Image: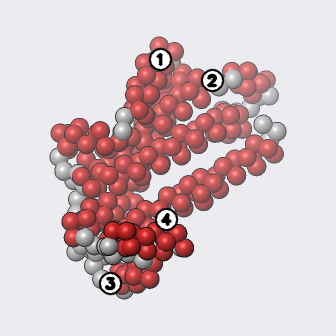
């Protein structure tokens, strides 16, 4: 908080322009919570619409990434080509997909979801394919020797071995998907969403609204990264430790 005040006072002193300080931003946020509209829509509607697009796009990316990753990991002649495609997708900046999104879907919801899918897919696919490809086959042989059923083999042998790499791919896909969502809402999205609120605040010079939207974006990132995936990682470490993996 102190750094925020220091930055604001420095900008006002050096540039001679007002800088939104915490009291004004929090007071404005309280007004939004009380019903004041943020560009013709409640602030919670901007928030939930962004989460909805993110969830839909990320869910599609997970299904495609896991499915194609397992296929390429198990089929040798597909692995090389698939990993090259996945590597290229990871190197492509999210904003570079804007022309493709506009050509395929125009402006709106579908274009935004497409950009999330195409950017989140790469990390999920690459980590899934590589982990399946490198899975130690002697683990399966040991499971057969112990007469484990397919479900027990999957739950006790396969998933614990693949989980760290799969979780890393999911984490990376979630992060890049969230970042490109905000950029997509600014360019190809509809009039409702956190990214849309930020770009509209630019034209109206409503920097308090922009700070509020940025704050909500940070909250989502912190919760998903520190608490959601942090909890899953701790649970995984405990499970692997108890299993002696």
Residue at the (74%, 32%) spot, across then down: 148
Element at label 4: helix
Quote the CA–CA distance across marks 1 and 2. 13 Å
Label 3 crowd (10 A; few <14 / some 14-19 / many >=20) = few
Residue at the (51%, 43%) spot, across then down: 172
Residue that carries the numbered disc 4 in the rendered image = 219
| Dot placed on the residue nearer the N-terminal end, 1 or 4 | 1
Residue that carries the numbered disc 2 in the rendered image = 134
| Dot placed on the residue nearer the N-terminal end, 3 or 2 | 3
Residue that carries the numbered disc 1 in the rendered image = 80
From the viewer's perspective, tell me whether residue 107 is left or right of residue 26. left
Quote the CA–CA distance across marks 2 and 4. 36 Å
| Dot placed on the residue nearer the N-terminal end, 2 or 4 | 2
Quote the CA–CA distance across marks 4 and 3. 21 Å
Residue at the (77%, 24%) spot, across then down: 142
Vertical comparison of 119 with 223: above or below: above
Element at label 2: loop
Asked whether 141 or 151 is in front, the reply is 141
């Amino acid at each position: 908080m102190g750094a925020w005040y220091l930055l604001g006072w420095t900008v006002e002193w050096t540039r001679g322009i007002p800088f939104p300080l915490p009291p004004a931003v929090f007071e404005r946020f309280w007004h939004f919570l009380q019903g004041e509209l943020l560009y013709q829509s409640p602030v919670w509607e901007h928030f939930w619409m962004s989460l909805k697009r993110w969830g839909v796009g990320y869910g599609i990316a997970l299904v495609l990434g896991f499915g194609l990753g397992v296929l390429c990991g198990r089929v040798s002649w597909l692995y090389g080509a698939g990993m090259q495609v996945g590597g290229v997708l990871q190197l492509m900046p999210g904003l570079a997909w804007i022309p493709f999104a506009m050509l395929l879907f125009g402006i709106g919801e579908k274009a935004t979801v497409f950009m999330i899918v195409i950017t989140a897919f790469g990390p999920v696919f690459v980590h899934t394919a590589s982990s399946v490809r490198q899975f130690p086959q002697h683990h399966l042989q040991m499971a057969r020797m112990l007469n484990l059923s397919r479900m027990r083999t999957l739950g006790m042998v396969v998933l614990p071995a693949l989980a760290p790499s799969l979780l890393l791919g999911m984490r990376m896909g979630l992060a890049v998907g969230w970042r490109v969502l905000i950029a997509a809402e600014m360019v190809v999205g509809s009039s409702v969403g956190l990214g849309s609120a930020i770009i509209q605040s630019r034209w109206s010079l409503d920097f308090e609204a922009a700070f509020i939207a940025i704050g909500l974006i940070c909250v989502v990132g912190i919760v998903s990264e520190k608490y959601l995936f942090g909890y899953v990682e701790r649970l995984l470490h405990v499970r692997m430790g108890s299993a002696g993996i």
